[in-house]
Structure formats: structure tokens, C-alpha cells
Amino acid sequence: MQIPHKPPFIRGYTPLVPRSGATADMLMDFGVVKLLPNDGWETSSDTDEQCWLLAQGSAEISWTVSGAGSEKKTVSRPDLFDHSPWCLSVPAGSTVSIKAGKDGAEWYYAATDNPKKFAPRLFTPEECRSEFRGEGTMRETSTRIVRTCFDDTNRSESNLVIGEVIGVPGKWSSYPPHHHPQPEIYHYRFLPGQGFGLTAIGDTPYIIRDKDTILIREGEVHPQVTAPGYAMWYLWIIRHIDGAHYGPATNTPVFIEDHKWVMGDENKIWAPCKKS
């Protein structure tokens, strides 16, 4: 399912994936909070864990957990292509307050139900695992940068997994094609902004553009490719499901058997003959 969003984000909160109606089965709320210089924003929940990822700008972010005091940190991110993110994860019962800096700030927000008690944590850009994935395989046609803010290895109490991918111009990501039972959200930005890419969700193709959101449901395969000349950034958020956390413990993701071979011997992959 594709959710297009062409205009600039408005001041305040823009809900992109509500946990109701046609998107209730995603099990998460997802949206963007755009703050002008010195704007403030505050939110709290007694039932939901929250995740805040800084897309760009600067801000002071503070968080309070009932009965456990408060903390705050001044954070900044010049842009989302060349700089890794700050990402705050807090449990239910928390209040998060944000005061934008002199240039404003843009945040991505996700929330889902979670009764577990755990300590809040602000993940720094240095703690965000960054890999140049696909390097040395598939004749470099699927090389991309994958940043993982947190998953089961460093945030097992959470019901979420969150990270980013930078799609290199003209190359594939989410490849080889794979699927998993857990719902996943992709949200895209392009450099330059008029860029585009292509994805196939199951057997349905989509042209993806700046600020579009794609919903991936149980068992849907989701490879994608970036148009030549453009860089494609996308945020990915996976919601664990009961009895099946996403990750190695549940053998996810599941690669399509017909295409697993491309991760092997480079010599088996066809390439054009050199011009004589």
C-alpha cells in the first residue's frame, strides 16, 4: 500500500500512518513533527512506547518517566543523507518535550502499545550501526548504506525495530527479495527532491517519490531500486508481533529461494562483454 504526500510538511504533527481504519493492522502510529525556530512540542502516553528520530535541524529534547526523574539533551543533525540520526526510545508512562533550535527541527515519530517497563535511552549517531551492505556481491548492483538505530540486539524490551537506508543512485536495496510476518513501514526522501525510485510490494509495482510512505504487510516481498542520478533515503520501522520478534531468533527476513543464489559466486552473474 502506498501513501503519497506531495506538499511540504505543515507546522506541527502530520499523521502518516494512524493506528486505526485501513492502517490499523500496522500496529503503529507514525508521523512527522515539523517545528519552526523555538517551537515547542510535548507528548505523553500511559500505554505506548514512543520513538523519536531527528531528521534534520537542532533541538533540546527532554524525557520524563513517571517516578524515575528526567533527562535532557541538545541534539542536531544537518541532514539525513550524510549524517546518522539521534533516536530516542522511551517506555509507556513517559513524557517527551522538544524545544526546537534557531533553525527549527523535523522529527519522525512512532508509537505502539507496550506494557513492559524499561529505561529510556537516547541512541547517539555513533551508536547507530552503519553498514555498507551488499559490497562485493551482485557486481555491486545492490550496494547501499544501512543504519540500524536499535533492534533486538540492543533494545530487546522494545516492540519496535528502527533504522535507515541510503539507496545509492541506480542500485537496488531490500535485496535479494525477502519477506517477513511482521508489519513494516518505509518512508522516503530523495536528493535532489524531485528524485524517484521503484518498488514492488508483492506483485504490485509503485513509483515512489519524496515524502511517500509504503506499508508492507505479512508475507509481502518488497525489493526496490533507486533511479540513476538520485539518492534515496528511507526510514524503516518494523513492529514485532507476539511470539515472533523480527531477527535471527525467528529466521527473519526470509529470502525468496529463487533469488538467494545472487549472494554467492560473482562469476555466475551475467555481465556484458567488453566492447572490442
Image: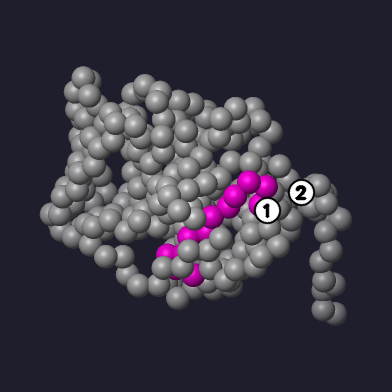
Residue 221 marker: 1
Residues at badges 1 and 2 in contact (C-beta under 8 Å)?
yes
Q: Quadrant of residue 111?
A: top left
Can you say which quadrant of the picture contains the C terminus? Answer: bottom right
**SS class of the residue under badge 2?**
loop
Q: Position of residue 136 (x, y in %)?
A: 70, 50
Magenta range: 209-221
Image: 133 above or below 272: above
Which residue does the image show at 51% across and 40% down from the upper left?
239
Q: Position of residue 1 (x, y in %)?
A: 56, 60
Q: Is residue 173 visible?
A: yes
What is the magenta segment's predominant secondary structure? loop
Q: Quadrant of residue 200?
A: bottom right
Q: Is residue 202 magenta?
A: no
| Amino acid at the residue labelled 2 | Ile
Residue 256 marker: 2
Spatial distance from mark 1 to mark 2, Cα to Cα? 8 Å
Q: Position of residue 187 (x, y in %)?
A: 47, 57
